Image (tube, grey):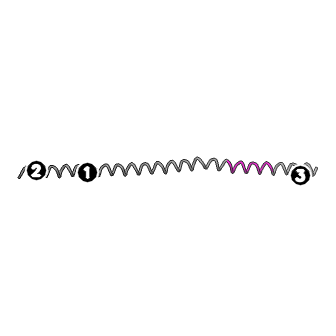
Amino acid sequence: MSKLLAALVATLFATVSVSSFAAKHMAAEAAKPAEAKMEAKKDEMKDKKEMKKDAKDAKKAVKKDEMKKEDKKEMKKEEAKK
């Protein structure tokens, strides 16, 4: 009887051990997609920042072009007055 009880306890211990290792493994696998999502969000935020920066640079370039056009117009007016 004691041998049967020892075998049952050993089987129970092995089953609990295996299931705990499996649970840890499953938790680690579940965490990987979350990390990938965070990386994707970071990349997306970087892209948005770059797009905003590019838009600002484009606006500045347009303003510079407009200023140059205004300067050219003023120069033409001054030349016409002479």
Q: Nearer the viewer, residue 45 or 80?
A: 80
Disc 2 crowd, CA 10 A, few/some/many (<14, 14-19, 20+): few
- Which is more foreground, mark 3 or mark 1? 1
Residue 77 — which label?
2
- Seen as rendered, the residue at the extreme left is 82
* Label drawn at residue 63: 1
In the drawing, does residue 27 fall left or right of residue 51?
A: right
Q: Marks 2 and 3, how far apart in space?
A: 107 Å
Which residues make up the magenta segment?
A: 14-25
Q: Does the magenta portion include 2?
A: no
Front label number (2 vs 3):
2
- How packed mark 3 is, by other alpha carbons closer than 10 Å (few <14, some 14-19, many 20 or more), is few
Classify residue 79 as left or right of residue 15. left
Q: How many angstroms separate mark 1 from mark 2 (CA)?
A: 21 Å
Residue, x 83% and y 48% (percent of image)? 11
Dot 2 amino acid type: Lys
Q: Is 16 one of the magenta-colored residues?
A: yes
Q: Which residue is mark 3?
A: 6
**CB-based contact (under 8 Å), mark 1 and mark 2:** no
**Nearer-the-camera pick, 51 or 26:** 51
Looking at the image, which residue is at 93% across and 52% down? 2
Residue at point 36% right, 49% down?
54
The Cα atoms of the two marked residues, 3 and 1, are separated by: 86 Å
Disc 2 + disc 3, Cβ < 8 Å: no
